[in-house]
Amino acid sequence: MPELDEIIHQPVRLRLMAALVAIKSGESAEFTLLRDMLGVTDGNLGAHLHRLEEAGYIAIEKKFVDRKPRSFISATEAGRKVFRNQVAALEQIIRGSTGGKGRK
């Protein structure tokens, strides 16, 4: 069975990483955009971001925009690689469960 990454396997973190890797490398998404997209609270998103940042999968940059603090989040290269591996592992599991025929 393929190896799944326990850190991003959690549903909110997997969706969060999917959103971040969809953004071009070097670009970022604002905290509030991610919060609204995922439908989570500030505290919940903050906890998930902290876990991903500790693992080195994301980078968080804090800036002031119009004198208000804002957080911008981006996937690191390590995070992008782990996400690609996670997707490949999930695809392998799906192929195995469907006898190699894939989903229809």
Image: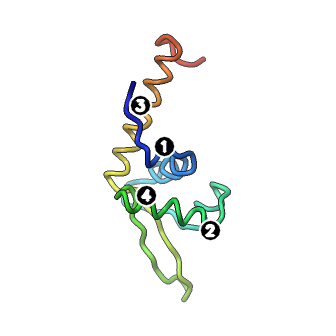
Q: Which mark is residue 89?
A: 3
Q: Read off the residue under disc 2.
A: 42
Tell me the distance, in whole angstroms, between the alpha carbons under discs 1 and 2.
20 Å
Separation (CA) of disc 4 from disc 1? 11 Å
Residue assigned mark 1? 9
Residue 41 picture quarter:
bottom right
Task: Kindly report the distance in space between the C-alpha atoms of the residues bearing marks 3 and 4.
Answer: 19 Å
Q: Residue 4: name its quadrant.
A: top left
Up-down relation of residue 33 to residue 100 (above or below): below
Q: Secondary structure at mark 2?
A: helix
Q: Amino acid at mark 3?
A: Ala
Residue closest to the eye, 25 or 34: 34
Query: Which of disc 2 and disc 1 is earlier in sequence?
Result: 1
Query: Compared to 27, does 14 lie above or below?
Result: above
Q: Secondary structure at mark 1?
A: helix
Q: Type of residue at label 2?
A: Asp
Front residue of this view, candidates 92 and 71: 92
Q: Secondary structure at mark 4?
A: helix
* Residue 46 appears left or right of 75: right
Residues tagged 2 and 4 counted as in contact (Cβ below 8 A): no
Q: x and y percent of residue 42 in the render?
A: 62, 68
Element on which disc 3 rests? helix
Q: Residue at x 41, y 43 (%)?
A: 83
Rendered image quadrant of residue 32: bottom right
- Residue to which mark 4 is pinned: 52
Number of numbered labels in the structure image: 4
